Image (cartoon, grey):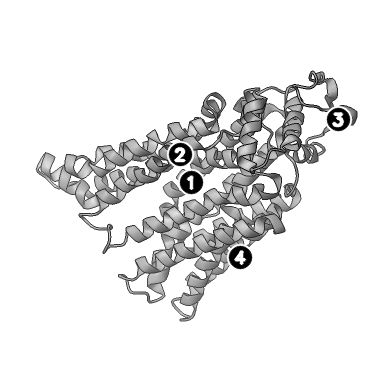
Amino acid sequence: MQEFYNQTYLDRKGIPMDSSFQKLLWSLTVSMFPLGGFFGSLMVGPLVNKCGRKGTLLINNIFSIVPAILMGTSKVAKTFEVIILSRIIVGICAGLSSNVVPMYLGEMSPRNLRGAVGVVPQLFITIGILIAQILGLTNILGNLEGWPVLLGLTGIPAVVELLLLPFFPESPRYLLIQKGNEEQARQALKKLRGWDDVDDEIEEMRREDQSEKLEGRLSVFNLCTFQALRWQLISIVVMMMGQQLSGVNAIFYYSDEIFKSAGVNENNVQYVTVGIGAVNVFMTCVAVFIIESLGRRLLLLAGFGICCVSCAVLTIALNLQATVSWMQYLSIACVIAYIIGHAIGASPIPFVMITEMFLQSSRPAAFMVGGSMHWLCNFTVGLVFLYMVEGLGAYCFLVFCAICLATVIYIFIIVPETKGKTFMEINQSMAKRNKLEIQMDKEMLNDFQLASERPKKKEEGYSVNVF
């Protein structure tokens, strides 16, 4: 692709592109994706509140199909500028989908499967990465002729979603709590569950709806200043920052150099990288099956803990591999261990926690905040990592080690276990830490009936008292 940039510039200007300008263009091409992801995260709240979760995902396909066409035809059109523009657009697609998909699935899932279903989006992200790594091999599409095809293929999943998603129901919680349409919510639940008795889930949604009428729908500003959700918000920010600032992208970037230093032939490094991608897929798949038995909190602590130790040992190994031969293999082991830690905890669980720690009125704003932190930190690491390597060398991984350690300490002290709890129960468990006491009129809650059978109770059944 960089050769295409240079050749295009040469055809236009008659002189080769300056190396510093080429480096700038390539840096822009890489960094526009997380920047687009940040813009996409800012669009989450307005779109999901107005168009629904399913509607937003359908609209979002535009931000994948259009840039895929533009990037796929960029070589024929002899323009590299359109690739940079398309990277922003496809970044918006990623920013929206990485937030809306976990929200949509989390709101549709039964309580006992909410964690497992919440990890599935991350599983398919890792599968997508692995497929891209395989297709990007030099002898497949990672060559002068094949790269436009590779970029154009990114629109195919969006076409599939555009064709199939209309047959799926909208989020029942969105239909009942935000649209006030109980009948549609009931029909959606019946379709999702496969049985007609959904009264218990409808009642749970009504309780959440009744509680939220006191606070109304929260904007990002309201969320940031709302005392009742203070520690939930801080927790999400810490986990999202920890997820990206823990150095996962840096590990992937540096892995090629580590493999080469361990004696892996330069032509075979790409195949080792594919192997690491396969490990990532396998361990994320493991997380799907163990999250409901081990819980979210333990996986977060284990995941960030493994990443912390891996970064510390990797720093030692990289500094000693010139004098101690077997340290090269320890470096590879550290990379694999780090990927395992990130795959079981740091990558998938924070998005699950956003869904579970916030109620319907505050969830879109929470995803906007969490998603924005995710993509801003992603952008920051991509921007400064090369300078960190230049200034600190192998010691740059100690920075990531410290961030992982700080995240582990915070999660251990603050973040509660949410496995098997309703959204209301999780909200109540955080009330004491927020210096609030949520008092519930149990008699009223036990007396809830279907709206068609009896008028709704007054809203004074919930009260919030500040200590």
Query: In this figure, which residue is indicated by the disc labeled 1?
Result: 378
First of labels 1, 2 by sequence position: 2
**Mark 1 residue element:** helix
Q: Of the two numbered discs 2 and 4 on the same chain, state the one appearing first in sequence.
A: 2
Residue type indicated by callout 1 = Asn
Q: Which residue was labeled with disc 4?
A: 309
State the CA–CA distance, disc 1 to disc 2.
9 Å
- Residue at the location (36% across, 61% down)? 134
Helix, strand or loop status at disc 4: helix
Left or right: 299, with 284 as reference point: right
The structure residue drawn at horizontal position 55% and vertical position 54%, both measured from the top left corner, is: 246
Question: Residue 75, percent across and down?
Answer: 20, 45
How far apart are labels 1 and 4 at the CA level? 21 Å
Residue 403 image position (x, y, % from top left): 60, 53
Q: Is mark 3 in CB contact (under 8 Å) with mark 2? A: no
Q: Where is residue 362? Give x, y as percent.
A: 65, 30
Circle 2: residue type:
Gly
